[in-house]
Amino acid sequence: MYPLDAGRWGPTVRIASLRDELRRLVDLDLVAGYRPSRRAALARYAFSGRLRGLNGIYVESSTFLPAEADLAFLGLAKALGTPVLTYVRDAYQLFGDYELPLTLRGRMATAAFRPMIRALRAVSSRMAVPSAGLAAALGFEDAALLPPGSPAPVDVVRTPGANRLLFVGDARLAAHGADRLIVAVGRAREKGTAVELEIVSRPGQEPPGPLPSWTHVVRAEGTQIIDRLPGIVASVIPRPRGAYNDLALPVKLYEYLAYGRPLIVTDCTEQARVVTSAGAGVVTGDDPGALAEGIARVVDARADQVQEWEANATAAARTASWEDRARQIVELMTAS
């Protein structure tokens, strides 16, 4: 339910990665795009008669909910006996962690969320979600768990004197925690930790200024972020705890694992579980003081400890590959 030709960001990272891996496993037909183009493409596909030759349909739903054409198409496929596995990527409309725009469209999307999710469930053979917490919040008792996957790990050596933390995401959204991260880095510096901050954001998502001289805002995506890794000592997800952030699994968490750097994450339930079980870094409280302590612990750590975190991050990335996620999708639809 997104176009895949407008750059790699958020949901399109996940969808494009799965598309590439599914193509290696099966014969794949792809329908993608925003609502107008998707309506036309689905109509053409339905009238082509190709629905009867399908072994399964995998759906990546969008934050902006399905259109009536999506529901009609999936309902027809299910009626023809085609297994439909629908993935719901988030549900922040149901929680107070995220301040949604007070526009008419925003209010309508929030009001329509649960009814449209129920409609999606009705035309699907099975639902899938990234975490058990989200499954419980949506009432999907039998949902399949499909966490984000990791790209292939990279091996990028740090340059001598590398001292930057990496934050990727919307730095204006309080629920992503960039504001408290900037405060935390300042406190760590005041206590003698030689560290700076690199924020990678899309246009319009930069932190409001003025910013300290040690905060660097850059534009980068995909391999461009990898090119910046020589100066990076650790990556950070500073989200404040809350009802939604506790159950969310950010795609960038798994990308961070692939970067082969220690992770510093706040103690939001799902992301903390991943980092702790992998032994890939440090989990901290979500207030600036606790974050500052976690930053100092990683940046000032002994070389052998840093190497252990890095090796564990790389190993975790290998065991959570997009290829494995694609194979799981195929197995789920085969079993339907």
Image (cartoon, grey):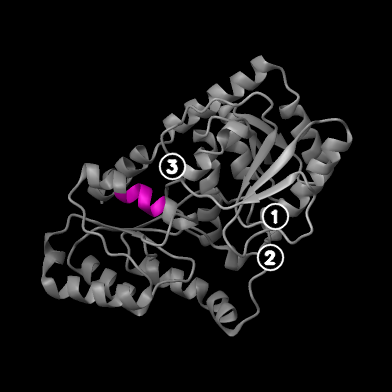
Looking at the image, tell me whether mark 3 or mark 2 is earlier in sequence order: 2
Query: Label 3, on which residue?
Result: 149
The location of residue 176, given as percent across then percent down, is 66, 54
Answer whether labels 3 and 2 touch (C-beta < 8 Å): no
Residue at horizontal 56 percent and vertical 35 percent from the top: 229
The location of residue 134, given as percent across then percent down, is 53, 54
Answer whether labels 2 and 1 touch (C-beta < 8 Å): yes
Please tell me how crowded label 2 is: few (under 14), some (14-19), or many (20+) other residues with Cα within 10 Å.
Answer: few
Q: Where's the N terminus, which quadrant?
A: bottom left
The location of residue 257, given as percent across then percent down, is 53, 34
- Kind of residue indicated by mark 2: Gly
Query: Label 2, on which residue?
Result: 96
Q: Does the magenta stretch include residue 168?
A: no
- Kind of residue indicated by mark 1: Gly
Answer left or right for 28 relative to 284.
left
Q: Quadrant of residue 152?
A: top left
Looking at the image, tell me whether mark 3 or mark 1 is earlier in sequence order: 3
Q: Residue 28 carries which label?
A: none
Q: Which mark is residue 242?
A: 1
Figure disc tally: 3
Q: What element carries label 3?
A: loop
Q: Which of 175 and 109 is in front in this view?
A: 175
First to last magenta residue range: 14-19
Above or below, 63 relative to 164: below
Q: Is mark 2 on a helix, strand or loop?
A: loop
Above or below, 86 relative to 147: below
